Image (cartoon, rainbow, N blue to C red):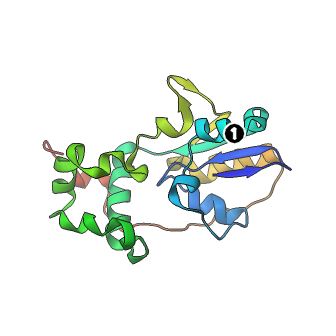
Amino acid sequence: MIIDHEKRFVFISVPKTGGTSVHVSMGISQHPPPAQFHASITKVLEENPVCFDYYKFGFVRNPWERMVSAYSNFTQEKAHYSWSRDLLNYKNFEDFCCRFPESKWANWIHFRPQVEFLFDGDTSLMDFIGKYENLHQDFKIVSERLGISAILPRVRTSRHNHYKEYYNEDT
C-alpha cells in the first residue's frame, strides 16, 4: 500500500499482482510488514478518511495463476521461509490445493480473495483496477493520470510453468 498525500493517490497492493514492482518504481525499497503492505482499501479509508477523495488504484490477476505464483514463490524464495516454510510440508501444488480450504493458508493475507482488498462488500472503492496480465499498459494509464514518469521494473518473479499445467479435476 502506498499513500501519497502530495500527489493525492492510494495504491492498494493485492498480493502477487506486481505490488513490489510498483513500490520500486516509486522509489520505495523498504517494505512494511505484510498486513500494512497489503492493507485493504477499507482499512486504509477507515484509518485515513482524507484519502477517500484521492485517486485509488490497484491490480488484480487471474486467480488460478495467482495461486500457482504464490505457492511457487513462497516455496522457492528463502526470504519468505520465516513464515512460509510450512508450505514445504505439502507434497506438491496439488496436495496444497486439495488441503487448502481446511488449512491455515485459507485465511493468510497472501491467499485471500482479491475482492477483499479492493471492495467493500459488492462495492468497488477503487478508481482504477488494472490487470496483472496488462501490467505495463495499465500502469502507464495510472502514471499518466498521476503525472509521473515511472518505469515499472520486473521484481520477485516466481519460477513455474503455465498455470494450466498445475490444475486437474482434484485441484
The residue pinned by badge 1 equals 56
Give the percent coordinates (x, y) of residue 63: 38, 43
**Quarter of the rendering containing residue 101:** top left
Give the percent coordinates (x, y) of residue 123: 56, 23
Along the viewing direction, whichever of 155 and 117 lies nearer the viewer: 117
Quadrant (top left/top right/bottom left/bottom right) for the C terminus: top left
Residue depicted at 30% across the width and 69% down the height:
85
Give the percent coordinates (x, y) of residue 139: 66, 50
Crowding at dot 1, Cα within 10 Å, few <14 / some 14-19 / many 20+, comes out as: many
Amino acid, disc 1 = Lys
Along the viewing direction, whichever of 155 and 111 lies nearer the viewer: 111
Residue depicted at 32% across the width and 57% down the height:
162
Q: Residue furthest front?
A: 47
Residue 150 shown left or right of residue 43 in the figure: right
Residue 140 shown left or right of residue 155 in the figure: right
Measured along the vertical axis of the image, is residue 91 above or below residue 44?
A: below
Could you tell me which secondary element the residue under label 1 belongs to?
strand
Residue depicted at 62% across the width and 30% down the height:
125
Measured along the vertical axis of the image, is residue 100 above or below residue 93?
A: above
**Quarter of the rendering containing residue 150:** bottom right
Along the viewing direction, whichever of 1 and 158 lies nearer the viewer: 1
